[in-house]
Image (tube, rainbow, N blue to C red):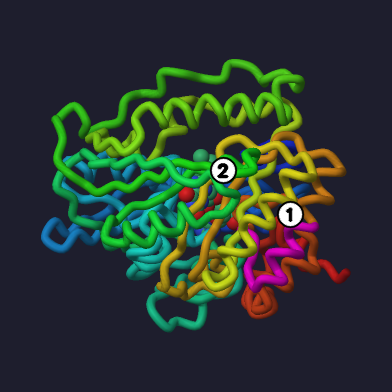
Amino acid sequence: MTPVSLDQPWGRGFNVEHTHAFARDSELPTRSFLPRGLGRSYGDVCVNDSGVLLHNFRRDRLLDFDEVHGVLRCESGASIADIAAVMVRKGWFPAVVPGTRFVTVGGAIANDIHGKNHHVCGTFSRSVLSMLLRRSDQDVQIVESNHPLEDVTVAGLGLSGVIDEAMLQLDCIPGPGIKQDTVLFGGNGSIDGYLSLDASSQAWPYTVGWIDTLDRGLRGVFFRGEHCDGPDDWLTPNAAKLAMPVDAPQWVLGRWSAKAFNELYYRAQGLKSATRETIPLWQFFFPLDAVTAWNRAYGKRGFVQYQFVVPRAAAREVVPKILAHLRESNVASYLAVIKSFGEHLSRGLLSFPMPGVTVALDVPAPNEKDRRALDRADAMVADAGGRVYPAKDARMSAVMFKRFYPQWERVEAMRDPMISSSFWRRVTRSS
Ligand SMILES: Cc1cc2nc3c(=O)[nH]c(=O)nc-3n(C[C@H](O)[C@H](O)[C@H](O)COP(=O)(O)OP(=O)(O)OC[C@H]3O[C@@H](n4cnc5c(N)ncnc54)[C@H](O)[C@@H]3O)c2cc1C
């Protein structure tokens, strides 16, 4: 174990103290610990203040691959980047990927991540055929469909044990390209433009929108894509050419700079409105990976990402209300993402997606007033029957968490007694 050091999650904003251990052999730490992947969760689900972090990212071997059926067995520290680097050449791709390729398989399962194809295939866990789970109080177990630890390991926030290995079903792809359509929408204060584009694009495997939450009209840009072939030099990603060398100064990060940024972004997309182009899949799925340490762009005080989902029947009315509330409360937000989730339900009790509409927005260095505005937004989400995403959170109250995830007590009952996280202690404390 290493000496105690100061750490920050991806969204920065607060410091925690950790001792670090590295998962290499079968021994688990003997004091309170938390498994950790690549730390790409924005808030405190991936930190364990004053405890041990058990780093898993070095356990990254791809162990076995069935080339006929596309079934991969790998160690859980293997990342989407590791898998895609090998598999795209062979004509296979992970069934679900998030907005960065630097997440591990263990982290993808523990947050049950979703991608731009949720409407077609649900969350990451639907591609997980089985897992090897190590706990401090039981023998190593093979967890597959209907195992008693399945619904608390999928989306289990790392609390049910250390996922050592996973067997994944990959998707067959024609090559390293994506055929992408870009269409502008909105402008009348509703999300009708987005919803109608989304409804008419259900046959596309990947759909997502960007929405300008600072614009009263709620203008946006809709992207839809499908896999296609491409030149050989697209088989691997380009190395990141840009890096944030220092923290951005705080004065850069306000409502006016967000407004200016959004205006520029919208105009840039407008220039190519309703265009079709073929781009490397890396650029379509992982645009932010082109800038190393982009989280420094939000300055030393960091940022929170606020991601909520509301059920389909309520979305048309409630999403604009929540966005208007945040805008009127002067909560600045740069790029916000809007996406419709499909009908596939996850096996995980704490899985975030539900059939409905989700919006994710970055809030730079939230102050007390911003936090109160977000608390109010939480209540609006809860009243509509929706929830907020733990993987992105560092602030929701225990009361709200328990409303969003009423089955949390079963996860607590099945938790490995040696595992805990700052998030779990915060949201399960009695209020
Ligand atoms: C730019 C960016 C874009 C993103 N886009 C999306 C998106 O589109 N969709 C989405 O759903 N998420 C998205 N995310 C969030 C990200 O996908 C998740 O937070 C993911 O879980 C991070 O994986 P990680 O390996 O970094 O895990 P960490 O953040 O290190 O850990 C996440 C959780 O997994 C647990 N864990 C990690 N390894 C293991 C293991 N071996 N066994 C048991 N538990 C383990 C940890 O305890 C923790 O609770 C994005 C994040 C970033 C930075």
In the rendered image of this protein, does residue 241 appear above or below residue 403?
A: above
Q: Residue at x 51, y 67 (%)?
A: 356
Residue 105 location, x and y as percent? 42, 53
Measured from the top left, where is residue 329 in percent x and y? 79, 44
Residue at image position (23%, 42%) is 179
Q: Any mark on residue 422, and which?
A: 1
Of 15 and 258, nearer the camera is 258
Quadrant in the picture for residue 298: top right
**Residue 415 picture location, percent across and down:** 64, 72
Which quadrant of the figure has residue 135? Answer: bottom right
Structural crowding at the residue carrying mark 2, measured as other residues with C-alpha within 10 Å and reported as few (<14), some (14–19) or many (≥20): many
Q: Nearer the viewer, residue 77 or 252?
A: 252
Residue segment shown in magenta: 376-389
The disc placed on residue 336 is 2
Q: Label 1 vs label 2: CA separation? A: 27 Å
Residue 377 located within the stretch drawn in magenta = yes
- Residue type at mark 1? Ser
> Is residue 36 visible in this depiction of the protein?
no
Q: Can residue 197 be seen in this view?
A: yes
Q: What element carries label 2?
A: strand
Horizontal side, residue 273 vs residue 44: left or right: left
Between residues 274 and 431, which one lies in front from this camera angle? 274
Q: Position of residue 127 (x, y in %)?
A: 34, 64
Whether the magenta-drawn stretch holds residue 155 is answered as: no
Q: Give the vertical position of 344 relative to 212 (above or below).
A: below
Residue at 21% x, 50% y is: 92
